[in-house]
Amino acid sequence: MRRAWLASIPLPALSLLVGILCGLVTWLMLDPVQGERLEQVFHNELVRRLDVRAVETRHRFERFLQEWQQAGHSLSYHWQIFSYINSPAWQNSQGQSRRYSGQPPEWLEPGHPSLGSIEPSHIVILDSQGDPREIYQKQLLPFSLDRVLDQYTGRDETMITLVDQSPYLLVWSNISVYPDSDPAVLLLIVAVDERFLAESQEMVHGTDTLIALIDADNQKLLVSSDTQQVKEGSHLQEWREHYLLTSQALTSYQAMEQSLLFTTLVSRVAVQKTIQNITKLAQQDRLLAALVYVVAFSVIIYLISTKISHVLQRISRFGQQALGIEQPVIKKGNQLLLLEDWVKAFFRQLITARDTLRDKQEKRIRETEVLKSALFDNSMDSIITLDEQGMVVEVNGTALKTLGYHRGQLIGHRLEEMAIVPHDRDLFRCMLGGCIRKSASDDTCRGQPMLATTMHGEEKAVECSVISIHLQQQTVFNVYLRDVTGRKQAEREITSLAKLASENPSPVLRINNRGVIVYANAASVPLMAYWDCERGQTLPLYWKNLVASVLKEGINKEYEINLEEQIFSLQLAPIRELDYVNIYGRDFTQMRIAEMQSRQHQSELVHVCRLSTMGEMSTGLAHELNQPLSAIINFASGCVRRLQSGIGGEAELVDAMAQITAQAERAGEIIKRLRSLVVKRPQEHEVVNLNHLVLEVTSFIESEANRQQVEISLDLSEQVLPVQVDLVQIEQVLLNLIRNGIDAMKQVAPDQRRLLLQTRKIDAGKVMVLVRDTGPGMEADTLKHLFDAFFSTKESGMGMGLRISQKIMQDHNGRIEVISKIGKGASFHVILPTDPTLELAGF
Amino acid sequence: MSKRPTVFVVDDDQAMRNSLKWLIESVSMEVETFESADAFIGSYYPGRSGCLLLDVRMPGMSGLELQEYLQANQIAIPVIIITGHGDVPMAVRAMKAGAVDFIEKPFNDELLLENIRYAMALDVKQRDMQSQRAEIATRLARLTPREHEVMVMVTNGKANKEIATGLGVSAKTVEAHRARVMEKMEAGSLADLVRMAISANLTLTDQQAED
């Protein structure tokens, strides 16, 4: 499922997705570390830079101080030169000092000394005793001048001193006027304030860097370059949060009592901002780089995968077309996954195909072997393989059968010694030799007639053929022995069979597809005479068309042809593969005559059968008659009872009487119907053989006799017994007697039921038929009434059969005689007149 | 039940039907005629009393088949078979199937009427027996299983003591049971009870059970 989902994403999309994902993960993992490290580096760098800056600021400050010292020196020279020209007024006067305020002294050039915008608050000239002689002050000092004068050490010096927690710069500069004159000292007093500090840095730095002087004892800020940001008098500690601090001692003040410290302050916010700026910039750079990488990577993957998918589609199409694999062409989705599946399936198919192919090949080889061995074994010829020495190597089943040897008896022996008569052995060797030399023509190696001997010494005519087979190492011979005894026999048989048609007494003809008589046997002459054509001539148009249609349909057809004297049935049998029709004729003139006679006779028999069922009919008749009779009785009885008991109206009785009449009429109708069944027809006397008559009757009764398990035996006279009779009537008499016999024998066991029919010539004028049964026989009393009308011993008998029979016999001038005893069966003799002059009719 | 006993005539021949009706009505009996077995089955209901005059040979359902049908449906109406000439084997079959008698056509009127009277009487008797049997069955249904057992044993001729040992109770209890049986069966005497048991096939079934 997941795989299918994965497989449905196109490879380029997937590669893009993976690329972006990888980039993102790498980014998320690396970015914080990188940022942190970068920050650390920047921080360290900043700290280092701060130190450098601190050194710079201090250096600048000190140089500023030195500049002040220089200014002091230059002013002192200036004063010296001036005093050299104009000896100072105070030279000889004691302890008097002159103060200038507002109006600068003459020796001071206007604007001097000053550095930038900073000017000294006081310029003091001291004498050698250290008393101030001239004082020029720009502004009033907040303290007594003496407090600073005592700090003079006698050397040129620049120093910062604290007076009431306010720093002041003191610049001492010795003046040597004349060698003889007293030295003097110039003192510049400059207030070290915000402006001073700012000026010292020449406003190089922005607001992020400040400098300040600190009282080392209490860590309090004395003055800063920007008092608005950093208040004087505040504790240094307060600023650590917002500023990075470096404090160092000023080198030239080491000897000072007041320990002053020079401090550089860098705004933390600014630093932080800088760091952040830099980090952000770096981050942006990284992001950009990452994006570029992802895009580049994705594009490359996309290009590669597109290429791959093209290749895969091509492979897939190739697979489909070349191998007929029903693998779908890779179209959409993740081609790599699909490829995997496809390749798997492809290999499976490949393996299956290979296996199938191998199986097929093996099967074919096996089949071929089986076929070959079957071919070899079941060949009609005897095949014997000999090696170069003429020894038997292999032998087929036919050879074993023909020669009568077992396999083991032949293999490894010389064939000619085993199976060729001595007379033909040379010929055989010659054939082998000729075959191997190839000098002999084909004929000498093929179909040479010779005699082979079997194991039992029997000689057989064979045709011997030899071929040599050149194998890699040796040459072998295949010897073919064809048993031609059978063929010779067959040739004889064919010759004799060929005569079959010509010997046929019925017409046999062969007609080709153009209707020409190709062959006609001798019996066909009447037919051809009728058609008025001979062998090699075309049939009349009607028959020609018949032959053509039969040939077309391919089905046997039978036609009748009525010649003047003969009737033929012609069967047209098409032989389509050879394109001709065989005609088999059959003369059925006799059969047709017999058929016609039989049909004629049958119509007569219908009547006989009708008569013969008289007995059965009587039962039905009784039932039929019973109905109206019973009704009549009932009506009559009803009437009588009503009349006796005096009930019943006249109308009612009359109605019943009418019913009686109606029923009586109904009975009359039934009897009339019965009579119409037994219409007496005019007698047709013809001359027949009595034997035939009996046979005929027997054939009618046979099935019934079988049903009743009665065995009928015939004992017919060998003489022809011609009688002139009404055939149907005599048959009826016989049938009646036979039926009576069969009925009578129902009372004895089935194996005792035998009926004898015998015909005999009694004398020149009389013939008779004897019908004898093995039934229970009859009493003399019965015999007396046997021929009375309506006398019957049978349940359903009418008592008419024998009566009618006797009447028929009387009509024929014949009679029926009966002999019977109880337990001895009954014999009926039917005696008919005959006349030797009678001639038999067709039947 | 409501109608008078009737002679049902089933014959396919109209003349026979009419003549039979004419004859039987002359002795003042009710006659109903049907032209086929099916027509008879269609209109007859088992409650009707009388007898059946049946022709053996009929198209459709034959007389014998109708007889079999009646038996299969437990309709106990007496049947007189009328046969034609030579139908003896059929008549024998009919008799075996329980016909009262068979008469061969053409027949004596006296013989026929005699047979009809006999069949009528038989019908009455059968109906009596049937209602009696039904009555006995309802009485039998009132008995408890134990009382039933006691009745079977009593009617098989066993003495009270034998019954007591057979059932494993005291003779007195048997006596009590026996009195209740007599009462419930409304039997005046032991002979009465035995007669009822026989008509209800009680003794026979029980003997078989004992075997």
Image (spheres, rainbow, N blue to C red):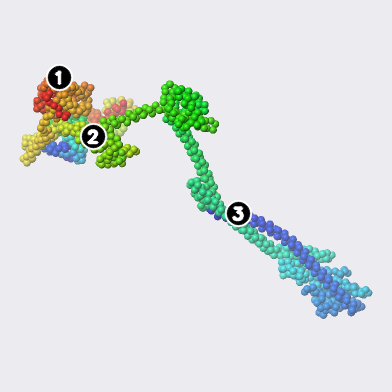
Q: What residue did someone put label 2 on?
A: A526
**Few, some or many residues within 10 Å of mark 1 (<14, 14–19, 20+):** some
The three-letter code of the residue at mark 1 reads Lys
Query: Is residue A638 shown to the viewer in this render?
Result: no
- Tell which of A511 and A650 is nearer to you: A511
Q: How many badges with numbers are in the image?
A: 3
Specify which label sits upstream in the sequence, 1 or 3. 3
What chain is tagged by disc 3? A
Q: Who's the residue at 57% across and 55% down the image?
A: A302
**Residues marked 3 and 2, same chain:** yes
Distance between the alpha carbons at the discs numbered 3 and 2: 114 Å
Q: What residue did someone put label 3 on?
A: A22
Instruction: From the top left corner, tell me how far across and down residue A253 is, in percent.
Output: 82, 65
Give the label, 2 or 1, closer to the camera.
2
Q: Who's the residue at 62% across and 58% down the image?
A: A292
Instruction: From the top left corner, tell me how far across and down residue A361 is, in percent.
Output: 49, 38
Specify which label sits upstream in the sequence, 2 or 1. 2
Which mark, residue A821? Answer: 1
Distance between the alpha carbons at the discs numbered 2 and 1: 64 Å
**Few, some or many residues within 10 Å of mark 3 (<14, 14–19, 20+):** few
Q: Who's the residue at 80% across and 77% down the image?
A: A111
The three-letter code of the residue at mark 3 reads Cys
Dividing the picture into quadrants, the one containing residue A804 is top left
Left/right placement of residue A779 relative to residue A499 reads: left
**Residues marked 2 and 1, same chain:** yes
Specify which label sits upstream in the sequence, 3 or 2. 3
CB atoms of marks 3 and 2 within 8 Å: no
Distance between the alpha carbons at the discs numbered 1 and 3: 135 Å
Q: Is residue A755 above or below residue A127?
A: above
Per the image, label 2 sits on a secondary structure element best described as helix
- Tell which of A572 and B194 is nearer to you: A572
Instruction: From the top left corner, tell me how far across and down residue A100 is, in percent.
Output: 84, 78
